[in-house]
Image: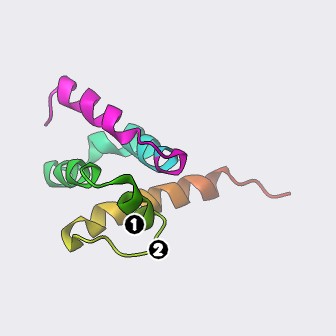
């Protein structure tokens, strides 16, 4: 389990220079991070070390993650975003 200072730092680093990344990373962090196991939390931290352009390509599913070990956390983030989007869509 991570301490509160580290958690706050990770949330801050989830806010990126790109709106698209913020819309994926911040909600995932807020809703899912605490329920991740220690290994997945570490992978999330590792993912945040990437450059915004790389993260954008991976999270928009334009190319696979350069580090195959991080692909599962990328998939969790994109799956969460997709599920959030579909649950918020109302029939016309």
Q: Predominant secondary structure in magenta?
A: helix
For mark 1, what is the residue?
58
Q: Residues within 10 Å of mark 1 (few under 14, many from 20)?
A: some
- Circle 2 SS class: loop
Q: Is residue 5 above or below residue 11?
A: above
Question: In the figure, is residue 3 to the left or right of 34?
Answer: left
Please tell me in which quadrant of the rendered image residue 50 appears: bottom left
The residue range painted magenta reads: 1-21
The residue sitting at the top extreme is 5
Query: Residue 60 at x, y = what percent?
Result: 49, 65
Report the front residue among 85 and 58: 58
* Residue 15 drawn in magenta: yes
Residue on which disc 2 sits: 62
- Label 2 with label 1: CB-CB less than 8 Å: yes
Q: Residues within 10 Å of mark 2 (few under 14, many from 20)?
A: few
Nearer-the-camera pick, 39 or 68: 68
Q: Position of residue 10 (x, y in %)?
A: 27, 36
Residue at image point 53% right, 45% down: 19
Residue shown at 25%/30% (left/top)?
9
| 52 relative position to 2: left or right | right
Residue drawn at x 28%, y 49% is: 48
């Amino acid at each position: 389990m991570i301490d509160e200072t580290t958690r706050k730092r990770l949330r801050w680093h989830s806010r990126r220079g790109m709106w698209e990344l913020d819309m994926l990373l911040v909600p995932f962090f807020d809703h899912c991070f605490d329920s991740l196991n220690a290994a997945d939390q570490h992978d999330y931290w590792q993912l945040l070390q990437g450059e915004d352009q790389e993260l954008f390509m991976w999270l928009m599913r334009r190319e696979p993650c350069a580090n195959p070990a991080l692909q599962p956390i990328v998939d969790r983030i994109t799956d969460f975003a997709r599920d959030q989007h579909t649950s918020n869509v109302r029939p016309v």
